[in-house]
Amino acid sequence: MKIIKNERSSNTVFLEIEASVATLNAAMDSAFQRVVKGVSIPGFRKGKVTRTIFERHYGEEPIIREAVTGVVNDLYSRAVQELELQVIDYPRDLKVDEYKALEPLNFSLAVDVIPTVKLGAYKGLSVQKEPQTVSEDTVTQQIAALCERYAEFQVVDRPSQEKDIITCDIKATLNGQPYEKWTRENTGLEIGRANYGQEFDTQVTGQSQGTQLNFEVHFPEGSSNPEVAGLTVQFEVELREVRARLTPELNNELVEKISKFKTVEEFTADLKTNLQAQADRESEDKFYNAVVDEIFKTTQVEIQQVLIEREIDRMIDELEAELKRSGIPLDRYLMFTQKTKEALRADYTQAADRKVRTELVLDAIAKAENLEVQEEDLINEVRAWNINGMEQDAESIKTYLNRLDTRLLSLMILRRKAMAVVSDSTTK
């Protein structure tokens, strides 16, 4: 293989490669062995036809086509490795010269590679880091929200109020015809959620068990239920039951029920610790983003759209996996959020662009600082995962690592080291 041309313009590399006569001849022999396998000619067993007989029936073209395709794919891959190109997409503009026996074969192509980052200032930055303190009000709000999750509903003998659950029979009529979608018997609904419109909730508020109501609700254009948008629905409602939401107080009994602790004091102290840890992470994230923003101000990098699209794909795959763990298909999620897949991709575009840009910059910093990932770094990373059932000694972790493709893990650690270089030199 001879690389005749290797030129870069912006983020595209233009290659011209020459395949030798010896390479082509070997490829022709291998190609014939592949194409002849499925050939049957009278007088010969399937796949046992000689090359002379094959060419007499089919010509040399099938062999040439197979051989040239194999040579181009093989030499392109070898050129990428030899030149250490970080290819990000399939090659394009492929041009292959006409095959001529006993002559070298040239082909040319263009391929997009990881963009060059022109680093600006990344050391000695000045970024304010704001520590976050968890207030008592925040703790109180968290406890109130927790108690709400364990609220129970109890039948009460009083008029209904907002947030009560009422059980009722509903008969809905639209344009003089029964509207089956909203006609229910013995159905429950929470006042305030406006399942049947805000006016419906207003009508059933302040009513007691056994009350019968007749009223109508007009639904404006743009209502969440397009079947009734701009129309008026007549309702006949009979209240069967009113249940009030009873929120428990945080006491030792509830603490033992919902946690590993036995007293309110222990539970509250742990909650404060967790909230503070969360606040510290948020503070660190804000600092991280502010530092990255400072680097972006003096750094130049031109990102190809294919990298952004690939990151969007990864983000959507991550969302889909998270939804699947909750038993929600992506299509149903899109229906609930009233989004199309295209709109979802558009929502992720800005975040994907920033993530790709940040990773490219950190990779460039790691290269500029000659940072490396050692075996000890990998061992410590896996040890921090604290995988159930895994021994924590170095040899056990090495055995585990030998079964993994550690490239992505190494890249994550390398970027973390690059950020540490920046952070350690930043005036906070």
Image (cartoon, rainbow, N blue to C red):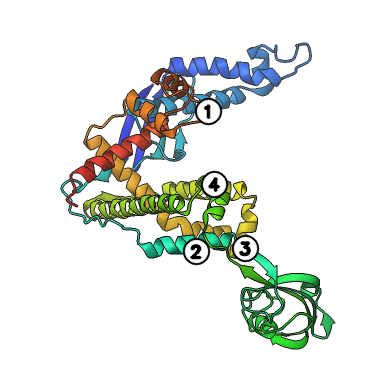
Please tell me whether mark 3 sits on a helix, a strand or a loop: helix
Q: Which circle, 2 or 3, is nearer the viewer?
A: 2
Q: Which mark is residue 69?
A: 1
User: Does label 4 or label 1 sit earlier along the sequence?
Assistant: 1
Please tell me whether mark 4 sits on a helix, a strand or a loop: helix
Q: Which amino acid does label 2 sit on?
A: Ala
What is the CA distance from the residue labelled 2 to the residue labelled 4?
35 Å
Q: Which circle, 2 or 4, is nearer the viewer?
A: 2
For disc 2, the marked residue is 144
For disc 4, the marked residue is 317
Q: Which circle, 4 or 1, is nearer the viewer?
A: 4
Q: Residue 336 carries which label?
A: 3
Q: Which circle, 3 or 4, is nearer the viewer?
A: 3
Q: Which circle, 1 or 3, is nearer the viewer?
A: 3
Q: Which amino acid does label 1 sit on?
A: Thr
Q: Which residue is nearer to you in this view: 402 or 391?
A: 391
Q: Which amino acid does label 3 sit on?
A: Phe
What is the CA distance from the residue labelled 1 to the residue labelled 2?
68 Å
